[in-house]
Image (spheres, rainbow, N blue to C red):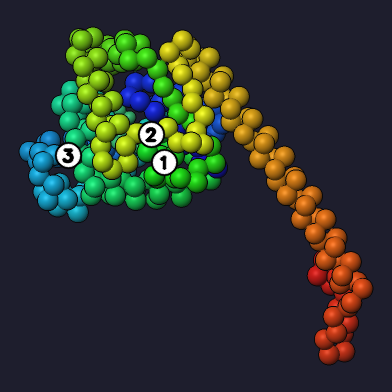
Amino acid sequence: MIIAIDGVSGAGKSTMSNQLAKTLGFQFVSTGMFYRAISLNAIELGISPTEEDRVSDMLQNISVRIGKNYDGSNICFVNGYDVTSQLIDPQVNFHVSEYAQLPKVRKFVRNLQHTQSTLAPNSIFEGRDIGSVVFPDADLKIYLTCALEVRAQRRTEQLKEKGKQPVYKDVLQNLTKRDFEDRHRKLSPLVVCEDAIVVDTTNLTQDETLQKLCQIVEAKQTYEKICSRQLCLAKNSELKIETKKFQEKPMCKCTKVYTAKDFGL
Ligand code: DC
């Protein structure tokens, strides 16, 4: 089963997806990490997002891998080095959406995501275009949203907890810029898929959000069970008809007369 969780920056996608994955025992992939890792590498090499050819050359020589930390969160390796703590550097925060707009970067990351999905039977992918582009056939699509000011406040607290010294106004400005870029880029803009369930976390605590997400997954799984049961019942009734036909007109092959029983029907 693949669950796609998309939404605006700072709506709690990463935290909530991670907790949901832990609760369900699913693989969790925070796909923004791929874009951040590529941006970090480009910044370190002095390649600007406007130099598309140089970014493209860089992608030929980079290996990006996402693994699982002891607490279930993601760790990211670039060319074998753990770069996780650098992925939230202000420079990366500021420029990541510019690198993420480049078609070659998006294609590169899409392939990485498809490969990652083969590593576990059940996964939660969290990002911006997971339901719309990367896994349009995802079993469940959730769109997380939240008021801008609340997101800025939460992100400021998060950065403080990580030992950074953020200024609320800068965080708010950065989120505004990223919202605009994510929604207005030509390729894979952030959209609410028609078949996505929208969850607004503005007035929800983490526990309440997790509870809501679990309820949605449970409802979906129950729905799937009912559907597959109905399908099974429908198939069984078809089989019964087929079986009846078989029994009425047994197939003759050489000396043996085949009946439905020979086919386990
Ligand atoms: O979720 P995040 O803040 O770590 O994402 C970092 C950036 O990566 C964000 O500005 C948009 C981009 N991104 C994207 O374009 N598509 C995704 N599936 C995930 C992230």
Residue at 21 percent of width and 16 percent of height: 173
Residue at 18 percent of width and 26 percent of height: 94
| Spatial CA span between label 1 and label 3 | 27 Å
Is the C-beta separation of discs 2 and 1 under 8 Å?
yes
Query: Which numbered disc, 3 or 2, marks the residue that appears first in the sequence?
Result: 3
The numbered dot on residue 191 is 2
> Front-most of 84 and 104?
104
Q: Quadrant of ligand 1?
A: top left
Q: Is residue 265 above or below residue 206?
A: below
Q: Which residue is mark 3?
A: 41
Q: Which residue is mark 1?
A: 132
Q: Position of residue 37 (x, y in %)?
A: 24, 37
Amino acid at the residue labelled 3: Asn
Q: Position of residue 249 (x, y in %)?
A: 89, 77
At label 2, counting other C-alpha atoms closer than 10 Å, the crowd grade (few under 14, some 14-19, many 20 or more) is: some
**Residue 188 figure quarter:** top left
Amino acid at the residue labelled 1: Ser
**Residue 82 figure quarter:** top left
Query: Which numbered disc, 1 or 3, marks the residue that appears first in the sequence?
Result: 3
Amino acid at the residue labelled 2: Val
Which type of secondary structure does the marked residue at label 2 adopt? Answer: loop
Residue 71 in view of the camera: no
Residue at 39 percent of width and 44 percent of height: 133
Q: Is residue 255 above or below residue 198?
A: below
**Residue 11 figure quarter:** top left
Query: Which numbered disc, 2 or 1, marks the residue that appears first in the sequence?
Result: 1
At label 1, counting other C-alpha atoms closer than 10 Å, the crowd grade (few under 14, some 14-19, many 20 or more) is: many
| Spatial CA span between label 3 and label 2 | 28 Å
| Spatial CA span between label 2 and label 1 | 7 Å
Residue at 89 percent of width and 66 percent of height: 244
